[in-house]
Image (spheres, grey):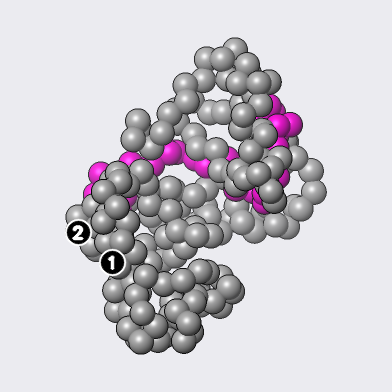
Amino acid sequence: MGHAALPSDKIPGLVNARGEFSNSPVGVGMNYFFKSGLREQLRAELHAQFEKFHATGLTLDHVNGHLHMHLHPVVFKILMADVKKLRIKYLRLTRDCLSRSQRMARGRWFYRASHAAIYEWLSGRARWPLKQHDIKHAQITFGLLQDSRVDEDYILKLLPELPPGDSELYSHPSLDKFKHEFEALVSPRVRAEIDRLGIELIRYQDL
């Protein structure tokens, strides 16, 4: 989704004439997987996106693609092949725990089960390359299976359920469409429960 970093004539197989990616993640994923002729265009666009970011002078906190496209087998392979040039040190390893999700929220069982299975497979195949390249990641990502329903009630149920080690909370905080997720993250009740349980709040840079 969105606009490419490269002009459309450089990556005609990836974008339309206005330089826009498709809004269909399934169709895009299938094209990337089965059309091998797109791989050099993908490599060029990925490098352009990283170069555009590094030009800001900011520190890259972690790598994460929209809709988790960074774990797509073809995209992930390119990232791992060029890890030093792209300066990748941290990456979101997207996976959620279906059993915990079922205890904390009701409904949408097909959505939860299907997404849990997909990301368990994608994250499973990514673990060894990440270890080889010493790329750090949280052991699990909670909130993925909530589908934009990471509200105060969910977080308060989640905190006592966190496994030992590091976990990531996945949400879409904003002041419009996902205001409930923003309010959950700044909730005094949530902060009090974090303090009560002795949970340490960290960033990727702290892993």
Is residue 27 within the magenta segment?
Answer: no
Q: Is residue 11 above or below residue 160?
A: below
Type of the residue with mark 1: His
Residue situated in front as seen by the camera: 105 or 11 = 11
Determine which of the numbered discs, if any, sits on residue 47 in the image: 1
User: What is the residue that sits farthest to the right in this orientation?
Assistant: 107
Type of the residue with mark 2: Lys
Q: Is residue 93 left or right of residue 109?
A: left
The alpha-carbon separation of the residues under discs 2 and 1 comes to 9 Å
Range of residues picked out in magenta: 129-158
The C terminus lies in quadrant: top left
Residue contact at pointers 2 and 1, CB within 8 angstroms:
yes
Image spot of residue 139 (x, y percent): 44, 38
Tell me which residue sits at (52%, 48%) in the image.
Answer: 95
Q: Is residue 126 left or right of residue 157?
A: left
Tell me which residue sits at (69%, 28%) in the image.
Answer: 157
Image spot of residue 138 (x, y percent): 43, 38
Is residue 140 within the magenta segment?
Answer: yes
User: What is the residue that sits farthest to the left in this orientation?
Assistant: 85
